[in-house]
Image (tube, rainbow, N blue to C red):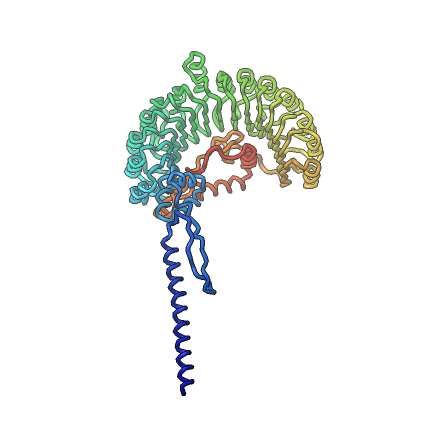
Amino acid sequence: MGNTASTAAAAVASRRESAAVQGNRSGISSKSRSVSSSVSPMISSTVNSVDDDGGSRRDFVEPDYISDLPDECLASVFQSLSSADRNRCSLVCRRWLQIEGQSRHRVSLNAQSELLPAIPSLFSRFDSVTKLALKCDRRSASIGDDALVLISRRCPNLTRLKLRACRELTDAGMEAFAKNCKGLKKLSCGSCMFGSRAMNAVLENCGSLEELSVKRLRGITDAAAAEPIGPGTAAQSLRTICLKELYNGQCFSSLILGAKNLRTLKLFRCSGDWDKLFQLIAERSAGGSGAPSIVEIHLERLQISDVGLQAISNCSNLEILHLVKTPECTDVGLIAISERCKLLRKLHIDGWKANRIGDEGLIGVAKGCPNLQELVLIGVNPTKLSLEMLASNCLNLERLALCGSDTVGDPEISCIAAKCVALKKLCIKGCPVSDHGMEALASGCPNLVKVKVKKCKGVTSEGGDWLRQIRVSLAVNLDTGDTDHQDASASDGGAQDNGLEFPPMAAHNAGGAGGGASAGVASSSTGRSTSFKSRLGLLSGRSLVACTLRKWTGGNTSARHG
């Protein structure tokens, strides 16, 4: 009996001791978790804990270095990210949301009328915006003057503004905006309804304006009766003027003539006789009050003849000239350019199959423009004679594109291979070239790095493969599809529209306005309309030259996101 009681007592004591040990373990573990949770994320530390066997160990708590970064460093990191990644980062925590918004300098918004109530909250978050894009769907009602004025008050430091299809904006709204944002340096507007008064208000109040791009300005219906635009205070600072699809483009003549420091002039599909304007520019240039500083001129589907080209030849500093679908321009005008514009580096000609520019004009270029680096010929029929002259005299010729030329065959390609020693990029489209021409490239053009051949029926895939095997370092892009209608206008493919030089990419895209609070209002710069236009250009066969040359020059010149 006594032994039984003693055994029972021992068992009870053992159970109590075991419970005490378990309690100690639980207490230690709980204490460990408590200490771990109290450790500052800024400081690395070690914490004592108990392992499964009851032993003690020291756990290392990983420090949170990102939380220790100054706001300025974190903002610098955000500025290197894409718009989508920035939006994701803004959802991490309140601090990141605030820093991301304050460091966002470029924003693109869907400018429908519903934007107005959201403007105060949007620009409370994005309070450092300097580059703003307001784009509206053509089927929707756009923001009005009250919204634009409110934005101008919230963003007095704007330097760039892009307006697309904001049809509810009037002269009064633009005038108020110009008075509030006097530091504006770049204005691009398309499919808007305001007119001369609005443009003059911008030119008068924004004395630092450097770049002006206007497309389909619908507020001026009668060019003869319309108020002249410019020159204004901004005439002293303007460097670039781009006019597109304007029935009333002649209204800008005063501005073009008054912009003494103008360097780039682009005129696309604008009605009227433009010979007179260039004659006036030449006269003022001769008198010392013109624009001799012009270095780049783009002309597309304009009423301009050799008279205008002869006047342009007075711009002795001209380096870049694009003549696209100007059927009244002939060899005579091109020769005048070549004789006086000795600094010409880039020449693009789309002859539109008019056969008004040929060997004679190109030989003139070969003789007068030794600095030529880039030549694009579309719908022009050069022969071996002119190509040999260009190769022999233009020793710096690095990029050459021949598209839709009936006279460019194997002999001409052989001539290029033998003579163009400096050539690096070659594009051939819709020409009667065969595999024999590819064979010539295998041993010629020692500096050639890329060849693109498209829709040349005589070139087979076997010929392209053979060329790749012979010259392993040469990038050969071959498309043997059937030849279609040649309409490779650079601007149709998006090149000239973006201000490209062979074409470098211009960057006009703006980053999306961010996630979170603005998700319903903000839109990415690479939106639906842009991608649709890109697909349309590819389907129509118009973007080959633009896309090819864009890749050749290395892409965009500016960051996409601020």
Question: Residue 10 appears at what percent x and percent y?
Answer: 41, 78
Number of numbered tags placed on the structure image: 0
Location of residue 245 with respect to 30 vertically, above or below: above
Question: Residue 403 appears at what percent x and percent y?
Answer: 60, 32
Foreground residue among 224 and 446 = 446
Q: In which quadrant of the rendered image does the C terminus lie?
A: top left
Location of residue 515 with respect to 22 vertically, above or below: above
Farthest residue, direction bottom: 1
Report whether 549 appears left or right of 222: right
Report whether 283 appears left or right of 403: left
Q: In which quadrant of the rendered image does the N terminus lie?
A: bottom left
Question: Residue 270 appears at what percent x and percent y?
Answer: 44, 28
Farthest residue, direction top: 287
Q: Is residue 30 visible?
A: yes
| Corner quadrant of residue 410 | top right
Q: Please report the residue visible at 37 percent of the width from the left and 22 percent of the height from the top.
A: 235
Question: Residue 134 appears at what percent x and percent y?
Answer: 37, 38
Q: Please report the residue visible at 54 percent of the width from the left and 34 percent of the height from the top.
A: 554
Location of residue 372 with respect to 482 vertically, above or below: above
Foreground residue among 76 and 197 = 76
Q: Is residue 497 visible?
A: no
